Amino acid sequence: MSSDTVSTISGRERLLATAAVMFRQRGYAGTSTRDLAAALGMQSASLYHYIGSKEDLLFDLSREALEVIGARVAAALDGAEDPVERLRLLIRTHLVTALSDQDKHAVMLTEMHSLSPARRAEVLKMRDQYEAYVEGVLSKARGAGVIRTDIPVKYLRLALLDLLGWTIFWFRPDGELSPNALADIMVTLYLDGARWRPAQDWVAAANGDGT
């Protein structure tokens, strides 16, 4: 790989990372290419060595957020057979991946509407494919009798993705919880529910005797 190629990759990644931060803080519409260039210490014209337009940045950020989370979740579940373990792996991997790049994932969720119709449709298609994958994992778990059947799986999927997705907006890397610790909480919250039960009921449920 040539030094020029390394420089281009490095410059593009720096630009995407900076755009993610600024789009999240100021909004896509409130961030100009001049703002991005100033933050990177370069001339505005130099940005076009890496992109064709500001929208290219939002499009690439949105696609990469979905590509990475989809690929990592699929890899984590590969070979896992137990339906409950697959759900645990899905929740943990999704959350830890999203929190490893909060700005990018937050921008994908909040600024997708700023894309042109064709590009927005492409990103929505990717999102829908991932959501269908998650719903498939939930459907298999329900078919195995390990999660409730009185709620349509569509709403189990929506509840799960809302639970995971919006943590991006309140999680603080310097707070009291690590991403893995938060993932443990979300696994417990989703799989066991928030309703209080006496300790003996949890023991009975774990032994297969609960309702």
Image (cartoon, helix red, strand yellow):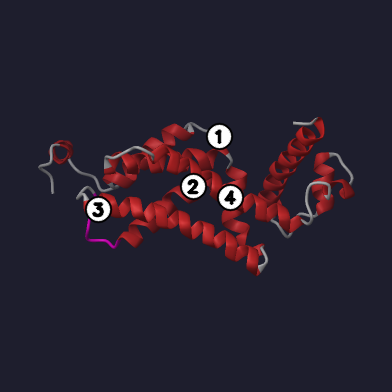
Q: Quadrant of the N terminus?
A: top right
Residue at the farthest bottom position = 117
Residue that numbered label 2 is attached to: 70
**In the image, what residue type sits under mark 1?**
Pro
Residue that numbered label 1 is attached to: 173
**In the image, what residue type sits under mark 2?**
Gly
Residue 155 placement: quadrant = bottom left
Image position, residue 79 (x, y; %): 35, 37
Camera-side mark, 2 or 4: 2
Which badge, 3 or 1, is on the more N-terminal residue?
A: 3
Q: Residues within 10 Å of mark 2 (few under 14, many from 20)?
A: many
Residue that numbered label 4 is attached to: 106
Residue 199 placement: quadrant = top left
Which badge, 4 or 1, is on the more N-terminal residue?
A: 4
**In the image, what residue type sits under mark 4?**
Ala
Q: Which mark is residue 142?
A: 3
